[in-house]
Image (spheres, rainbow, N blue to C red):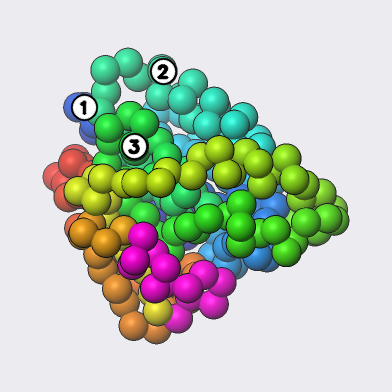
Amino acid sequence: MISSRKNALASHPARLALLLLAWAAVSAACKGQAEPSDAGPSVGAGAAPAGPQTLPPLAADAIATIEALMARHPGAPFCFAGSSLGGYYATWLAEKHGARAVLLNPAIDPHVGLRAYLGEQRNLHSGEPYQLTEAHLRDWEGLWVPRITPARYLLIVETGDEVLDYRRAVARYAGAEQIVVQGGDHSLQSFERHLPRILEFAGLAGA
């Protein structure tokens, strides 16, 4: 699913889409099995980079990495697309940069929801141990956006999300364009059917 999503959100002469995937290191709590990225969140900007890049575990470092990638395309309008924790990052980036964002079963407040998972955890995909610390929570809290601009967002959620309560996303992004799919799970099983609208919203239709 990662490669199909990345390829679908391809570069356009006048616009780029950044796809932010969930952090696999906390995926047992924050993301389902459909994002088999390796060590952490990855980011791709259409066909611009050589491939997905693993983001650092601390949010401040992750944002710096994303913005460094953006700086390689000065003046290009961006649309962010984020799933789970990537949706949380996408919200902060969209508000800061005046951009649009597509949110797929997004995390709402990981600095609150992941507190119960502090301590040693295990990477869902590599099996390697890691420490989820207060530093992670502080960094995520620093990216909390108290008030959003609803017109910037396309929210797509599935009611069967077993990790996050889709109703919180619906309430958080009230006034935004929303697609609520009955059933499914946190991996967003219905993703493929939404591609035409996602591409249109991102300004990539026909690219």
**Residue nearest the viewer, comparing 51 with 170:** 170
- Height in image: 135 above or below 128? above
Does residue 65 appear to the left or right of 157 in the view shown?
right
Q: Residues within 10 Å of mark 2 (few under 14, many from 20)?
A: few
First in residue order: circle 2 vs circle 3: 2
Percent of width and height locating residue 45 = 40, 34
Kindly report the distance in space between the C-alpha atoms of the residues bearing marks 2 and 3.
Answer: 17 Å
Callout 2, which amino acid?
Ala
Q: Are marks 1 and 3 in contact (CB under 8 Å)?
A: no
Q: Are marks 1 and 2 in contact (CB under 8 Å)?
A: no
First in residue order: circle 1 vs circle 3: 1
Per the image, label 1 sits on a secondary structure element best described as: loop
- Farthest-out residue, bottom: 183
Picture residue at 77% right of the left edge, 47% below the top: 133
Percent of width and height locating residue 85 = 53, 52
Reply yes or no: does residue 15 show up in magenta: no
Residue extent of the magenta highlight: 160-172
Give the number of the mark in front: 1 or 3: 3
Reading the image, the residue beneath label 1 is 13
Q: Quadrant of residue 198?
A: bottom left
